[in-house]
Image (tube, grey):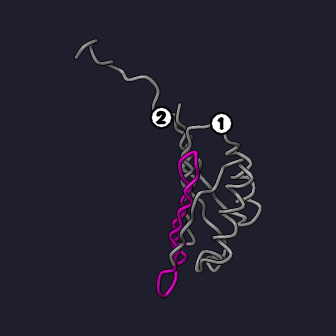
Amino acid sequence: MFRQVLYDLWVEDGEILERTQPLEEIVLEAARRSGAVILHSHFHQFDPHGVTGVVLISQSHLTIHTWSEDRFAAIDFFTYRHLDVDAALDYVRERLRPIEEKVTDLSRGGPPAHPPEPGG
């Protein structure tokens, strides 16, 4: 079974969401704390501010997108293994200190609703 956790958060001061650092460091450490195996990461700095980042993990991916002018960040943690996503989110909370948040935890995949006919 696949698990996708969508984490929306709003911070008091959008300045922390403006630049790749410290966000890259925070997201990579969150991935490590979940137990994920990091394969590659790329973080892009927008002008004048805002960040998009992706961390490819052997279990799928972790992404972040920020809109500092709205003091908003969207994080997506998608995995097919039993990672400790809660530990990752706790670390993000500790570092970004959201004033409001919304977590959507989805189960995805599993057997198809209409399996193919044998020999089809």
Q: Main secondary structure of the magenta part?
A: strand
Relative to the observer, which residue lies in front, 84 or 50? 84
Q: Nearer the viewer, residue 112 or 75?
A: 112
Above or below: residue 9 compared with residue 111: below
Asked if the residue at tag 2 contacts the one at tag 1, i.e. Cβ–Cβ closer than 8 Å, the answer is no
In whole angstroms, how far apart are the C-alphas of marks 1 and 2?
13 Å
Compared across the picture, whether 95 is left or right of 4 comes to: right
Q: In the image, what residue occupies the spot 65% across and 76% down?
A: 16
Height in image: 42 above or below 32? below
Q: State the residue at coordinates (52%, 83%).
A: 49
Work out which residue is located at the far top of the displayed protein and give it. 118
| Circle 2: element type | strand
Label 2 packing within 10 angstroms: few (<14), some (14-19), many (20+): few
Q: Quadrant of the C terminus?
A: top left
Residue at the front extreme, as displayed = 119
Picture disc at residue 108: 2
Q: Percent from the top left, x then y, of residue 48?
A: 49, 87
Q: Is residue 73 magenta?
A: no
Task: State the residue at coordinates (65%, 51%).
Answer: 37
- The amino acid sitting under disc 2 is Arg
In this rendering, the label closer to the viewer, 1 or 2 = 1
* Residues packed near mark 1 inside 10 Å, few (<14), some (14 to 19) or many (20 plus): few
Q: Residue type at mark 1?
A: His
Of the pair 105 and 23, the residue shown nearer to us:
23
At x 67%, y 41%, the residue is: 83
Estimate the x, y position of residue 19 in percent, counting from the top left. 59, 80
How far across and down, in percent of the image, does residue 23 sit?
64, 71
- Which tag, 1 or 2, sits closer to the chain's start? 1
Residue range corresponding to the magenta coloring: 45-70
Q: Which residue is mark 1?
A: 82
